[in-house]
Amino acid sequence: MPKGFHCGHITKRSYIGQYHRIYARSFKQLLDAEPANYILRVPELDEQHQIFKLIEHDEKWPRVMLFTINDQQIPVPLQLDNSSASNKLYLICPYCINQRQYLLATKKTYCCRECLNVHYASQSESKIDRLARRIRKQRRKLWSNDHIFINDLFESSGYFPKPKGFHFTTFIKKQFELINLETEYWQLAGKQLGIILNDLDELNRALTG
């Protein structure tokens, strides 16, 4: 049975990129704000997801944002994490009551990724896709987007010049790490190409039989 097919239908994953996110860091000023009605100026959200009432709650959750979506009240508490010097602010998911850096806007509510059961796109990537993304990410850290071949994996990082501001020893170390990743990438790519060519040969033999 082909991958992705089960009981006669195609299984589909939902991905986090399909939903708009609200981030806890955007609401830090509300900790000292007066209880009142507020609005999020976010064009991607409808009016019900933008308007909320800020209310006082208790010592654990000093402020709670109360949204009314489809006639249902959705409370989103704000909570400071006092375990570190940064006093990081979190949103509390209304369903699992866990601290989250962001919540996702659905048609009916706000909730966290786990409660909505959505995935990051990278979770569906193959090993070779993850390697390609990692190589490009490390290249951008070294050369930003200035190099013309920054995303071209046919070009080896071994030929890229040392960027300004990097100590030579540090650059050589990072360049060597990249070359090792690129070698691993092309070993996997070679295996995949071999499988494709073998399948084509078998198909041609079957057709010419």
Image: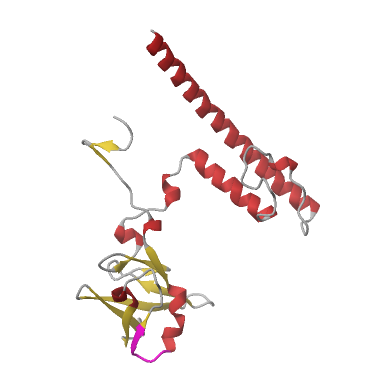
Q: Quadrant of the C terminus?
A: top left
User: In this image, 117 relative to 191: left or right?
Assistant: left
x then y, percent, for residue 15 = 37, 53
Q: Residue furthest right?
A: 168
Tell me, yes or no, whether the highlighted magenta stretch contains residue 37: yes
Q: Quadrant of the N terminus?
A: top left
Q: Residue at x 31, y 46 (%)?
A: 12
Image height of 142 relative to 2, above or below: below
Name the quadrant containing residue 189: top right
x then y, percent, for residue 36 = 33, 90
x then y, percent, for residue 91 = 38, 73
Name the quadrant containing residue 65: bottom left
User: In this image, 25 relative to 71: left or right?
Assistant: right
Q: Which residues are magenta?
A: 33-38
User: In this image, 32 relative to 58: left or right?
Assistant: right
Q: Residue at x 36, y 61 (%)?
A: 19
Main secondary-structure element of the magenta-colored stretch: loop
Q: Residue at x 28, y 43 (%)?
A: 11
Name the quadrant containing residue 60: bottom left
x then y, percent, for residue 96 = 29, 66
Q: Residue furthest left?
A: 71
Q: Residue furthest bottom?
A: 34
Q: Residue at x 25, y 67 (%)?
A: 108
Image height of 153 relative to 20, above or below: above
Identify the image's colour scheme: rainbow, by chain, secondary structure or one colour: secondary structure
Q: Nearer the viewer, residue 90 or 206?
A: 206
User: In this image, 116 relative to 180: left or right?
Assistant: left
Query: How many numbered discs?
Result: 0
Tell me, yes or no, whether the highlighted magenta stretch contains residue 184: no
Q: Nearer the viewer, residue 59 or 203?
A: 203
